[in-house]
Image (cartoon, rainbow, N blue to C red):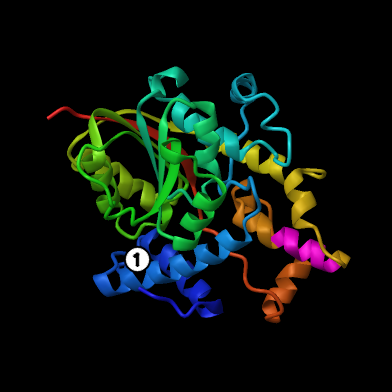
Amino acid sequence: MESTGGPAAINAFMDTVSRFNGPSESAVLDAEASDEFKGHSIWLYNVAAMMAARGEIWNWGMDDPILAKEIDDVLPGSLGFCTDGVSEQLYFRALRELPLALDDYAGKTVLEIGSGAGEGLNFLSRAAPGGRFLGVELSPMAVRRSNALLSRGDQLRYIQGDAEALPLGDAEVDVVISVESSHNYPHPERFIAEVARVLKPGGYFSYLDGFTEHRYDVTTLLKRDVPGFEWLSEEDISEQVRAGIRKRMAPGSHFRRVAEVGNTRLRRHVAFQMQATTMGSPFIGMETSPVVRAMQKLGRVPSAWTLPVESYVHSVARRRSE
């Protein structure tokens, strides 16, 4: 599973994600290709974890004034300091749409699959402080970073593991959340089956991600075919996500101030353009500038890449009692 890293690993990662999110005949990866892809994924997210700033949450975010007000009531000021407050909203929604009040999480175990640098789950642990929060992440470096900076005993901790083979026992957790991570999983049927396995009967699954048309169709069939779940709701939140991306990209945003740090105007411009693509700018129709496209053509900067996401969807399910 080990990757040699570098530009070749980045290109292989991007090509493979595009492959299994698309309708090509080679979309299903065999065991060897899957292991190779996960090796590239580990290398890439290890690097990202080492570069991640404190408080930086890895998702496109969303913007909903009502949701933002609810967060400010629970954690005053948390959306206004060193953040644009949009990634936090996406995480808060993951719990808010479940039929549980924040106080109801006392004594319950909440699992995040694909916890990244750990900051999103840390935010939720502050919003529902009585719960026990556990993050599972494929990248060992991201897990080390999360535990070093964020863990708080049984209240919040992180472990290394694969979303398609979770290192947990059957019926071990009360709630599972997955926030903008599953598009990186080669075998979504294994991921959803693992969620069903580790959830207690009556437990909840809150599932948010951006979908290509093909991946959405595959997921819709899996909801029908993978046993163990009662699917309670599905909501297209694309417009709220686009509003969050626009807020992040707006002049004067925290994202712009951080992305445009550099000693020349050109470097600031290139940095912003490249990071904007990662944070969803194509989803709002924002194109890479002619200057950066020319530099990419000349090989001066790497090609920017993102999946051709058609929709952003939030689904909620309950684990059936056997």
| Residue found at the very far front of the displayed protein | 153
Vertical placement of 102 versus 32: above or below?
above
The quarter of the displayed image where residue 178 is located: top left
Q: Quadrant of residue 18?
A: bottom left
Query: Where is residue 230 drawn, in percent x and y?
Result: 24, 29
Q: Is residue 121 above or below residue 44?
A: above
Is any atom of residue 221 visible in this view?
no
Q: How many numbered markers are drawn?
A: 1
| 304 w.r.t. 92: above or below | below
Q: Report the residue at 44% width, 25% height from top.
A: 130
Label 1 secondary element: loop
Q: Quickly name the residue at label 1.
A: 24
Crowd tier of the residue under label 1, counting other residues whose Cα lies within 10 Å: few below 14, some 14–19, many 20 or above: few
Residue found at x 68% / y 78%: 297
Q: Position of residue 77 (x, y in %)?
A: 70, 28
Looking at the image, which residue is at 59% across and 36% down? Answer: 88
Q: Nearer the viewer, residue 141 or 97?
A: 141
Query: What span is in magenta?
Result: 266-273
Q: Nearer the viewer, residue 118 or 178?
A: 118
The N terminus appears in which quarter of the rendering?
A: bottom left
Q: Position of residue 165 (x, y in %)?
A: 26, 55
Quadrant of residue 205 in the image? top left
Is residue 107 left or right of 73 when viewed as pictured?
Answer: left
Q: Is residue 320 magenta?
A: no
Q: Is residue 153 left or right of residue 229?
A: right
Q: Position of residue 282 (x, y in %)?
A: 61, 53
